[in-house]
Image: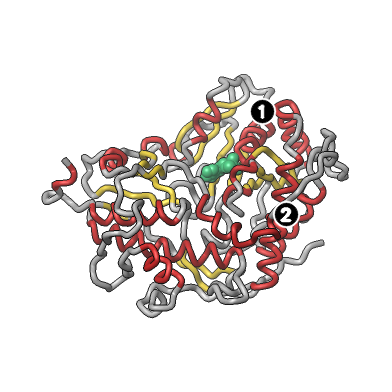
Amino acid sequence: MFNFCTCMSFKQEPCSDEERGKDSPVRKRDFKKGIHEIMCINNPPLRVSTSERGDYGDDRVINLDAGDPTMYETYWKKMGKKATMVIPGWRSMSYYSNGRSLCWFLEPDLCQQILRLHRVVGNAITEGRYIVVGNGSSQLILAALYALSSPESSEPTDVVSAVPYYSSYPSMCDYLKTALFKWGGDASKYEKEGSNYIEIVTSPNNPDGSLREPVVNRSGGKLLHDLAYYWPHYTSITAPADFDVALFTASKCTGHAGSRIGWALVKDPEIAMKMVKFIELNTIGVSKDSQLRAARMLSIVSDSCEQFGSTNVSDNRGESFYGFGHRLMTERWCRIRQAVKHGGMFTLPEFPTAYCTFLHQPTESRPAFAWLKCEDEEEDCAGLLRRHKILGRSGVSFGCSPQFVRVSMLDRDDNFDLLVQRISKITAAPNNSERH
Ligand SMILES: Cc1ncc(COP(=O)(O)O)c(C=O)c1O
């Protein structure tokens, strides 16, 4: 029904002097802020400036604990009227939507734009799938667990995910103390034979950006694929996702976390119907206003890909949403790696390069989070960052040791600039007087 469009490729922005040279938007922006340029690989050490702006080099705490995608505000501000919606008072008053979807509260406009965006990006098979819309993918995770669990079983179904797993999974599973499912911990250590289980496969993974496959692989198991970050600004699109249940969210796809829109692509109509029932019982559907807004944002993203396709250099004509995201994330990863190298206190994961069918070139992952590891095994990494006025989330929340901490890479420019400045100043022991 839908052809998978292989859109034109972006030119990836390398981290060279030239690219970050005089006329680059990055340099212009940094200059404007009064920050001396933070050079990339093989360049002189970072210099953190005396700033003309009061909020630079200042003392405020930066909260990078959550993956709040405010970085995308600049793109949407540029979209101006195109991305501004007016919804008349009489519109969308009904509980129901007029579509013919199994998901009776799914707005037809949103359905159409979801199908279109997956076709444009090529990151998921939509043929033969039912779309279930949810209040963010958070609600859909619970709906899917409800639908995939085995109510006839005497024991709750174990829900597992490999460490480091998304920190919300354990509490999502257990806070209602349902008899249907319970958190079963690290999928790589799951050994219960003959029991029902659900494995959540998050790829690219939150928090460490790794690309993942199921690890338990036992009969009786069901899979839930959380693909929140399977978009071209974060990772290479290598093939359209083809899973029984795949979850996506506007929060990470366009940055509209506040609209609370997620969607599931579901193969089995019975599972889809159970998910719909769960959402009906919880919230009697999903805000029509939010769905219409999300539909508009998705359509602007698809339009931008069709119009600018491969351009990731902002010129007079503009750039696609993924061009913008890809450019910014590439630049941010370059800067954080440079800062980490300069400080010497932490390490970051390395990512493989893979051919991206959307960008038409090999690209390296640019995850939404930096998963920092303290070189000092004794160190409580989140505590160390806190002493430097950076709030991150401890590795403990992800099933790991406190030697790890996760910080968001998706915050606004000024907070990201402060992050880079501060990380570069946290130097390795024993000369690190700032640690005490
Ligand atoms: C892997 C993953 N899944 C699901 C979610 C929930 O997203 P939302 O409820 O905003 O759609 C997040 C949010 O950070 C996430 O990182």
Q: Which of 29 and 391 is in front in this view?
A: 29
Query: Marks 2 and 1, how far apart in space?
Result: 38 Å
> Horizontally, is 436 left or right of 138 in the view?
left
The answer to whether residue 157 of the structure is visible from this angle is yes
Looking at the rendered structure, the secondary structure element under dot 2 is helix
The amino acid marked with disc number 2 is Arg
Where's residue 94, x and y in %?
84, 34
Where's residue 395, x and y in %?
36, 40
> Horizontally, is 343 left or right of 217 in the view?
left
Q: Residues within 10 Å of mark 2 (few under 14, many from 20)?
A: some
Ligand 1 is in which quadrant of the figure?
top right
Where's residue 397, x and y in %?
41, 35
Q: Which of 204 and 386 is in front in this view?
A: 386
Tell me the quarter of the image containing the N terminus.
bottom right
Q: Mark 2 points at which residue?
A: 296
Nearest to N terminus: mark 2 or mark 1: 1
The amino acid marked with disc number 1 is Ser
Q: Which of 163 and 261 is in front in this view?
A: 261
Please say if 285 is above or below 376.
above
Tell me the quarter of the image containing the C terminus.
top left
Q: Which mark is residue 49?
A: none
Looking at the rendered structure, the secondary structure element under dot 1 is loop
Q: Mark 1 points at which residue?
A: 150
> Horizontally, is 26 left or right of 381 in the view?
right
Where's residue 171, x and y in %?
50, 29
Q: Which residue is drawn at 49% across and 31% down?
A: 170
The answer to whether residue 404 of the structure is visible from this angle is no
Label 2 within 8 A of ligand 1 by Cβ: no
Q: Residue at x 49, y 49 (%)?
A: 205
Please say if 198 is above or below 51.
above
Q: Residue at x 60, y 57 (%)?
A: 76
Q: Nearer the viewer, residue 223 or 234?
A: 234
